[in-house]
């Protein structure tokens, strides 16, 4: 699924991950708790590494399917 993630500085990241919106919200909530308990940074790059390590979810930059030209 495609997501637009806004950080606290209102920067936007257009990303894709193979999870639902509800799952993403739950994981962000869990990550926020993780950061509070461990006194670690609540940042996008940290989240991207955390979600891959603990949940096996790969977040990648969204790129629309490339169009390939074929001449006949």
Image (cartoon, rainbow, N blue to C red):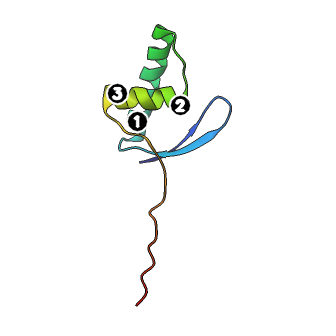
Q: Quadrant of the C terminus?
A: bottom left
Q: Are marks 3 and 2 in contact (CB under 8 Å)?
A: no
Give the percent coordinates (x, y) of residue 9.
Answer: 68, 31
Above or below 30: residue 71: below
Residue 70: name its quadrant: bottom left
Q: Using residue 18 as the reference point, say whether residue 62 is left or right of it.
A: right
Which residue is outermost to the bottom? 72
Q: Using residue 19 as the reference point, say whether residue 32 is left or right of it.
A: right
Which residue is outermost to the right? 9
Foreground tag (2 vs 1): 2
Specify the label residue 44 is tagged with. 2
First along the sequence among labels 2 and 1? 1
Foreground tag (1 vs 3): 3
Above or below 60: residue 44: above
Q: Which residue is mark 3?
A: 53
Q: Using residue 23 as the reference point, say whether residue 36 is left or right of it.
A: right
Question: Residue, x 35% and y 36% (percent of image)?
Answer: 57
Residue 46 or residue 10, whichever sits in front: 46
Q: Which residue is mark 1?
A: 22
Q: Secondary structure at mark 1?
A: helix
């Amino acid at each position: 699924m495609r997501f637009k993630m806004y950080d606290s500085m209102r920067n936007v990241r257009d990303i894709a991950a193979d999870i639902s919106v509800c799952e993403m919200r739950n994981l962000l909530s869990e990550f926020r708790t993780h950061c509070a308990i461990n006194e670690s940074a609540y940042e996008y790059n940290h989240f991207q590494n955390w979600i891959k390590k603990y949940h096996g979810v790969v977040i990648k930059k969204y790129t629309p399917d490339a169009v390939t030209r074929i001449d006949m």
